[in-house]
Image (cartoon, helix red, strand yellow):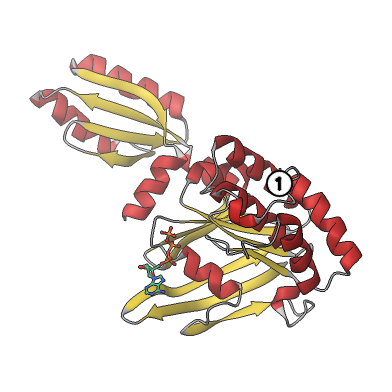
């Protein structure tokens, strides 16, 4: 079931088209990565979903059973969360809870629990002006879930954190995604892979694809036979002749190399190797390989 569906969202800033007819669906209880390189349009998308920015055109449709005021069921952590520096972390949390409709008692309870969860218990009664960037990001994260939202929007939630902080936050998200939908933007594929079930890939303001992380891993992770030959006429001619092999797909090719795929990779390996030996081909490389998600990402955003 969809919590939220975006249909042909576009957004201009003067002459810049930050978002171009982006359509995607946010399912319930999913952890989704909004992935893309710098300037892809991730922050613009999240700001529109959070209701902080209006799209130039297009529409957003929320599940009809949810309150019309999105703030009641949505939590948002912006890229650079802003706080009142004179407040303590605890006071910040309590006032955020009260603003979201919690009673003072409940807001205090939530503040205590969440500050502990995000690793700020020791600093709870220190002024936020003395917090480091990483501590502010942790406080922002706690603040975004104070009212137990159905949808949590996070803009680069781990960018200011050290490796241990990154791990902590990714673990927290893994636990929270059982109770709510999490949509987090990142340009780090590795972080997305750690915790997300799904990804929306953006590039230059467009949604390039939306899909399941496991399905993507399976498609990109399909094995191929990598063959490289030396700069030798007969070997290069033999390499070209592989294009005609029945039941075989050429995934990539160049003068000296090609990547072959087939349903039965073992049979393909035997056939090609036999042929190479018979023809006296000067092989430089002959190996089974798999494309990593990282390679797929780089190719997708370069296209
Ligand atoms: N307030 C603004 N005024 C003018 N142009 C803007 C504004 N905000 C964003 N842009 C432009 O819109 C495009 C998309 O920006 P956006 O911040 O949404 O991308 P992003 O994917 O979040 O990037 P990053 O990973 O660097 O944070 C960029 O070309 C950016 O320069």
Taking depth in this image into account, of 262 and 57 the one nearest to the observer is 57
Q: Is residue 297 above or below residue 129?
A: above
Q: Is residue 187 above or below residue 16?
A: above
Taking depth in this image into account, of 182 and 172 the one nearest to the observer is 172
Q: Quadrant of the C terminus?
A: bottom left
Asked whether mark 1 and ligand 1 are closer than 8 Å, the reply comes as no
Classify mark 1: helix, strand or loop.
loop
Taking depth in this image into account, of 141 and 234 the one nearest to the observer is 141
| 242 with respect to 94 (left or right) | left
Taking depth in this image into account, of 157 and 90 the one nearest to the observer is 90
Q: Position of residue 142 (x, y in %)?
A: 71, 55
Looking at the rendered structure, the number of numbered marks drawn on it comes to 1
Q: Is residue 195 above or below residue 143?
A: above
Q: Which residue is mark 1?
A: 123
Name the residue: 36% across, 22% down: 287
Q: Is residue 285 above or below residue 52?
A: above
Name the residue: 82% across, 52% down: 112
Q: Quadrant of ligand 1?
A: bottom left
Q: Position of residue 66 (x, y in %)?
A: 77, 76
Q: Position of residue 185 (x, y in %)?
A: 53, 57
Task: Using the rendered view, name the quadrant where residue 139 is placed.
Answer: bottom right
């Amino acid at each position: 079931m969809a919590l939220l569906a975006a249909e042909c969202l576009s957004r201009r800033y003067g002459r810049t088209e930050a978002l171009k007819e982006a359509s995607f669906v946010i399912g319930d209880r999913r952890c989704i990565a909004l992935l893309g390189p710098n300037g892809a349009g991730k922050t613009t998308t999240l700001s529109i979903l959070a209701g902080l920015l209006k799209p130039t055109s297009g529409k957003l449709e929320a599940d009809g059973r949810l309150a019309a005021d999105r703030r009641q069921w949505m939590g948002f952590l912006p890229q650079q969360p802003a706080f009142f520096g004179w407040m303590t972390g605890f006071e910040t949390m309590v006032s955020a809870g009260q603003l979201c409709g919690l009673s003072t008692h409940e807001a205090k309870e939530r503040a205590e629990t969440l500050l502990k969860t995000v690793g700020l218990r020791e600093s709870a009664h220190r002024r936020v002006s003395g917090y480091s960037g990483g501590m502010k990001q942790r406080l922002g994260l706690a603040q975004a879930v104070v009212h137990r939202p159905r949808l949590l929007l996070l803009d680069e939630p781990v960018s200011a954190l050290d490796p241990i902080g990154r791990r902590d936050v990714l673990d927290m998200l893994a636990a929270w995604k059982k109770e709510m939908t999490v949509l987090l933007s990142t340009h780090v594929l590795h972080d997305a892979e750690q915790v997300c079930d799904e990804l929306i890939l953006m590039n230059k303001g467009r949604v390039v694809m939306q899909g399941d992380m496991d399905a993507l891993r399976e498609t990109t992770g399909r094995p191929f036979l990598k063959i490289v030959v030396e700069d030798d006429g007969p070997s290069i001619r033999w390499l070209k002749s592989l294009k005609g092999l029945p039941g075989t797909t050429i995934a990539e090719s160049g003068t000296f190399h090609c990547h072959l795929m087939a349903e039965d990779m073992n049979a393909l390996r035997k056939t090609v190797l036999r042929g190479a030996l018979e023809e006296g081909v000067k092989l430089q490389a002959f190996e089974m390989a798999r494309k990593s998600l990282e390679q797929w990402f780089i190719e997708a955003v370069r296209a």
